[in-house]
Image (spheres, rainbow, N blue to C red):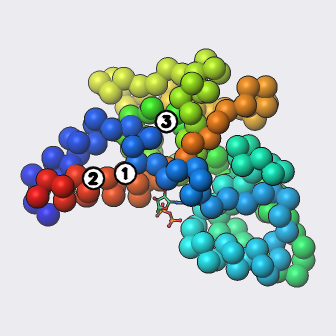
Amino acid sequence: LSTLKIAIGAMELTKKCVRDVMTDIDDVFMLSEDRVLNAETMTRISDSGYTRIPVYEGNNRNKVKNLLYVSDLALIGKDNNITVKAVARFNKRRLRIVDETMPLTALMDEFKMGDYHLAMVAKATDVKKHHHGKFVDDTMDSFIMKSMKLVEATMLPHDASEEHPITLVGLVTLEDITEELLQSEITDE
Ligand code: ADP
């Protein structure tokens, strides 16, 4: 990979938003928080191959409340009938929700901060309903300010999402961004 091609890929990224690279919500492997972590569930989880699993309330896949890390399951005996809810609430993994129109460069800045490398993606109009809709401005120079703004903008308190349900449209990870970078490089051939 030549440096020039990587640079071109990086430039391509600046034109794209989260929606362009996310995994569609229908393809996201999630678990209900009511699910019991028995042998069958453990097998499903390990067969999925994913390391982080969104956890939703009841049978509403739109109400993702927690994240389960596969590593959180290391010490769980599969005969104890522990629920996903118990493990997810105990470990309290940070769940982030971003707007589908968020520029990839802005999400990359957030990922670079290292706090988390996965976010759920909400339909644009829904996030705006919460008056959190002000996303980014690519040219804003202060990286910290930008990140702080995004933190504010994307933290949807659970109670608020109760009143104005948001619609989840996907999931995005750092991997999706890096893959996009390499893809741009390939189509450039
Ligand atoms: P992992 O570390 O679990 O393999 P990555 O961050 O490497 O996840 O992402 C690889 C791809 O899998 C990305 O396209 C990402 O959007 C997708 N992905 C990650 N977690 C899930 C999940 N729980 N369900 C569906 N797709 C997922």
Residue 85 in percent (x, y) is at 82, 57
**Can you say which quadrant of the picture contains the N terminus?**
bottom left
Q: Nearer the viewer, residue 188 or 149?
A: 188
Q: Amino acid at mark 2?
A: Leu
The label number, if any, that marks residue 177 in the structure image = 1
From this view, report whether residue 149 is shown above or below residue 74.
Answer: above
Q: CA distance from mark 2 to mark 3?
A: 18 Å
Nearer the camera: disc 2 or disc 3: 3
Label 1: few (<14), some or many (≥20) within 10 Å?
A: many
Residue 76 in percent (x, y) is at 79, 76
Res 90 seen here: no
From this view, report whether residue 137 is shown above or below residue 106.
Answer: above
Q: Is residue 112 left or right of residue 91?
A: left
Mark 1 and mark 2 in contact? Answer it, CB < 8 Å: yes
Q: Nearer the viewer, residue 170 or 104?
A: 170
Q: Amino acid at mark 3?
A: Glu
The label number, if any, that marks residue 98 in the structure image = none
Residue at x 36% of width, y 23% of height = 137
From this view, report whether residue 51 is shown above or below residue 176.
Answer: below
| Residue that label 3 marks | 100
Question: For numbered disc 1, what is the local secondary structure?
Answer: helix
Question: For numbered disc 2, what is the local secondary structure?
Answer: helix
Residue 154 in percent (x, y) is at 57, 32
